[in-house]
Image: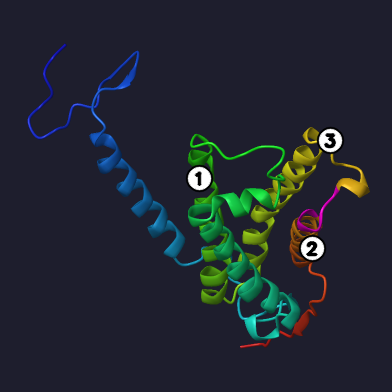
Amino acid sequence: MRPPAPGHADISTSESGPQNPLYIYVFVPRLAFSFARVASAPSLATPNFGLQEPTTKMPSHANIPLFYRIALLWYEPLASGLGAYLVLFEPDKYLNSFVPPSYASRSHTDDILLNQLAAAFVYVSLSQGVLLRYTNDITIWKIVNACLLGWDFILLYSIWFGLDKQGRLGLAEIRGDDWGVIGATFGMTLIRSALCLGVGFQKEKVRGKRQ
């Protein structure tokens, strides 16, 4: 095999994958920069020659129902931040809200998964508490929360799975802690679904003008 030309990194691959990870630092930032340029380019839509048809637009950030703003900008970021704190610093208390201490105890190998769960909690907290405050675009609100619906459904499945494996699906075996977790998770799933469906929003008519 010929040696690489001067000034060029060796990014040849073998059966086990790339031999030099330098391509990550060279091509990935360049690709991200290209996407950023495309995203910031002016729209290439066909001109309407001064005529604009009546359109319908979604309300601005100020017109988002107060219920959604309280739930998504305040409650969920704080609840997810609390979840991250419990997982990192009081993991036993967090696990006891799902599994009674008499059923199982935490092992050190569980901490690996708990730390990864904390990262997910932090992501949810920041995406809701920071990103949604930054943008007025209702579409962004819907996209973010539509993606987080996957998180909600997996959480609901994990709650059911845990209760089933513990033999505690009967109403008599479900504790107050379990009901709290079920109610909070199911409630946020309903709120997020309602937002994505546009429940509670009023569309505004905007009439075009002849220029």
Give x and y (percent) for residue 121: 56, 56
Name the residue at 53% across, 45% down: 114
Residue 136 position (above or below residue 91): below
Viewport quadrant of the N terminus:
top left
Give x and y (percent) for residue 63: 70, 84
Give x and y (percent) for residue 5: 10, 26
Residue 145 position (above or below residue 23): below
Name the residue at 72% across, 83% down: 66
Instruction: Specify which label sits upstream in the sequence, 2 or 1.
Output: 1
Instruction: Specify which label sits upstream in the sequence, 3 or 2.
Output: 3
Q: Which mark is residue 154?
A: none
- Do the residues bearing badges 2 and 1 touch, measured as CB atoms within 8 Å? no
- Amino acid carrying label 3: it is Gly
Q: Is residue 32 left or right of residue 163?
A: left
Tell me the element at label 3: loop
Residue 194 position (above or below residue 172): below
Q: Nearer the viewer, residue 122 or 88?
A: 88
Q: Residue 116 carries which label?
A: 1
- Amino acid carrying label 1: it is Gln
Tell me the element at label 1: helix
**Mark 1 → mark 3, Cα distance in angstroms:** 27 Å
Q: Which of 162 and 93 is in front in this view?
A: 93
Residue 132 position (above or below residue 170): below
| Numbered range of the magenta stretch | 174-178
- Amino acid carrying label 2: it is Gly
Residue denoted by label 3? 167
Please indicate, yes or no, whether residue 45 appears anywhere in the rendered image.
no
Q: In which quarter of the image is residue 33?
A: bottom left
Instruction: Specify which label sits upstream in the sequence, 1 or 3.
Output: 1
